[in-house]
Image (tube, rainbow, N blue to C red):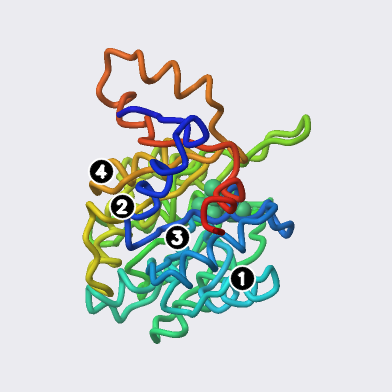
Amino acid sequence: MSAINIKTLARENVLKFLKSFDTVLTDCDGVLWMHMTPLPNSSDVMNLFRKFGKRVFYVTNNSTKTRDDLVEKCKALKFQANKEDILCTANLSACYLQSLGFCKKTYIIGSEAIARELEQVGISYYGIGPDTINQNNPYSVFKKDPEVAAVIVGFDEHFSYPKMVKAATYLNDANVHFIGTNTDERFPVSSDVVIPGTGSLVRCIESCSERKAVIMGKPDKYMAKMLMERSNIDPQRTLMIGDRCNTDILFGTRCGFITLLVLTGVTALSDVERWKQSEQQEERDLVPNYYIDALGDLLPYLKE
Ligand code: PLP
Ligand code: CA
């Protein structure tokens, strides 16, 4: 991998790069927006890609949004997007269970978005919201629901010891499916506070259940499998844009996509420089083909 700074290329070579793909997969948070604030010119860039006939997909690890939520968010922030252009881990979790012909109940550690997506495919669930320790009998906090045959772990602000007990107990049965939405360890930190991400919760449940979760999000290839099933894309002519190398860029590398890192989110250029020199293939796989300070910086090349 090369990590070419787009801005060091002659204009004709940037145009060649822009012509080298006809499908664009973009990560969302850190590339297009930060929470509710769009990053400058990023919507113009994405909308121009569409205008020039490129197929655009929004691929996010965020498990707290349904596809409908993300269509709404795109609309509010002026990104053109339809429901079928969105791949998000709450929806993929539901699709995964549906693909198994699953018709039992799911215990969710996660948010309402997972519940909404399960409802859309007719799968029953419980577990949303706070859970409290039974102070009189903390190690026997619940009775197993015999209908539960899957556990999904996504982002959950109410993550707690009672939830760990439930998940680990259900997963003690090897026939119970174990799904983790994504592996992001923590959120981008703009202040002094570190916010643990879903990956930390998934690892916690993996540890106490002594099981490995099937992961829906980047860098695992399930997302790409779903994409390939839904549309006919050519990996060699597909661009993956991301701000986090151990999810977005690794996903792109594994799938044989062209990769572009933007420096508006998690990964810093100093990390990329270190991985480039690494002896270890796993670290070299984190190096993108290209990088640019911000997605919006592509705008001058897309406008004549
Ligand atoms: N998980 C949660 C709960 C989030 O809120 C976010 C970003 O907001 C992410 C994961 C990462 O999302 P993305 O893959 O779009 O960067
Ligand atoms: Ca991101």
Tell me the amino acid under the disc marked 1.
Cys
Which of the 4 image quarters holds residue 196? top right
Mark 3 CB lies closer than 8 A to ligand 1: yes
- Residue 20, numbered label: 2
Q: CA distance from mark 3 to mark 4?
A: 15 Å
Q: Secondary structure at mark 3?
A: strand
Determine whether 142 is above or below 99 in the image. above
Location of the N terminus (image quadrant): top left
Q: CA distance from mark 1 to mark 3?
A: 12 Å
Determine whether 95 is above or below 36 in the image. below
Q: CA distance from mark 1 to mark 2?
A: 26 Å
Tell me the amino acid under the disc marked 4.
Arg
Q: Secondary structure at mark 2?
A: loop
What residue does disc 4 label?
A: 254
What residue does disc 3 label?
A: 59
For marks 3 and 2, the one nearer the N-term is: 2
Query: Which residue lies at the image location 70% right of the left edge and 73% below the top edge?
Result: 76
